Image: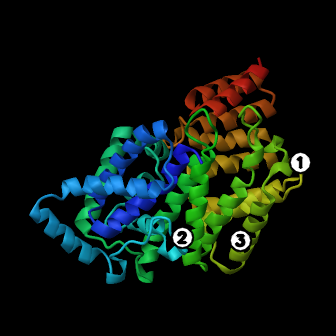
Amino acid sequence: MSFEAVIREQAPQVLGVLVRRYGQFDACEDAVQEALLAAALQWREEGVPDNPRAWLLTVATRRLTDQFRSESARRRREENLVVMAPAGDLVAPPADEERAPDRDDTLTLLFLCCHPALTPASQIALTLRAVGGLTTAEIAHAFLVPEATMAQRVSRAKQRIKAAGSTFQLPPPEEREERLQAVLHVLYLVFNEGYTATSGAQLHRVELTAEAIRLARGVHALLPDDGEVAGLLALMLLVDARRPARTGPGGDLIPLAEQDRALWNAGYVKEGVALVTRTLARAPLGPYQLQAAIAAVHDEAPRAEETDWPQILALYDLLAGVSDNPMVTLNRAVAVAMVRGPAAGIDELSTLDKDERIASHHRLDAVRAHFQELAGDLAAARASYQRAAKRTNSLPEQRYLQARAARLA
């Protein structure tokens, strides 16, 4: 396992143990960040230790101890400790102990970050930072806001968590639904960042997609009858199933229509289809279930040419009715183009040009370029591909879009 993967896996677990023991979320998060910095300096020289979690926990605890030297700080810590956890939780389990989903510190931390004292945007931002391990810049890109704005949002969220005096345990059933939508959106964003990294040389960040799926499984184990939880897990499995065929030997992006479907993860496809089939039969429709159903139609087609686009368009029509999201409109336009022709697809994009949430996003230009190419307007398509390439920070996407443009020269 790479250094980055170890950090991604262990950091939220260490933070969870510290918050369980000491409370004071902001101080614990700062201590973990200092421990991660120390690990970055030492582990790259000496290698990852046999028990990285214990190493990080020891270093982070020492950092906290430095902050808790005064007698008044000691008393506050003891009082917080009593408030923060039941008696049975005062002693943290061993760092390497395997836990059931409802005793996973990472999952508990996930719900803590989605505290009702925070706005939905702050819940998501804090969880992406503390649990997902994304940088402030990556979170800002996901929210389409400046990095400085996101840094302030994360800082304020930590202070509100501290002021709320929340307990480090899973919320009771009557409060879980209140936080659940933010939790699911967090996992959705983490997965998307892993499946298509917003920047860098690699298209995928496998550690993020794996963590999002792991946490989604944990939430599903807690709430097995919730349709949207099952839908999100199914969506992740059905989309991640395509990852082995999504890049070539050199890391170049391969679009869905050109992928070798024999390389797809058949186990994930089977599990995802079964999940979404069960939940559609018994739960009220929600956006994650509908997205999973669309993914299932794609994955069940033996060849791209056999994709049931009319069914996909019908599902997007339903999705548009429950989710006011420009990405839904963009993806629906693809289905419209496949059913009614590229000119109809181009017409569907016109409403997005005035939508500030997506007007400058590279995907809008890329989709328009594809429609223009299908319609035979090669000069316009080339210009749109070039514009899309300039608007993405992902090197694999840049190379793909530039190659499409060059082919039309």
As measured in the structure, the alpha-carbon distance from the residue carrying label 3 to the one carrying label 2 is 25 Å
Residue name at image x 86 percent, y 56 percent: 301
Rendering quarter of residue 116 = bottom left
Q: Is 117 located above or below residue 156 in the figure?
A: below
As measured in the structure, the alpha-carbon distance from the residue carrying label 1 to the one carrying label 2 is 45 Å
Q: Nearer the viewer, mark 3 or mark 2?
A: 2
Q: Nearer the viewer, mark 3 or mark 1?
A: 3
- Please tell me the numbered disc located at residue 400: none
Residue name at image x 57 percent, y 44 percent: 2
Residue type at the position of mark 3: Leu
Label 3 vs 2, first from the N-terminus: 2
Q: Which residue is mark 2?
A: 98
Residue 316 appears left or right of 354: right
Please state the horizontal and vertical placement of residue 397, each as a whole percent of the image. 65, 33
Residue type at the position of mark 2: Glu
Label 1 secondary element: helix
- Please tell me the numbered disc located at residue 275: 3
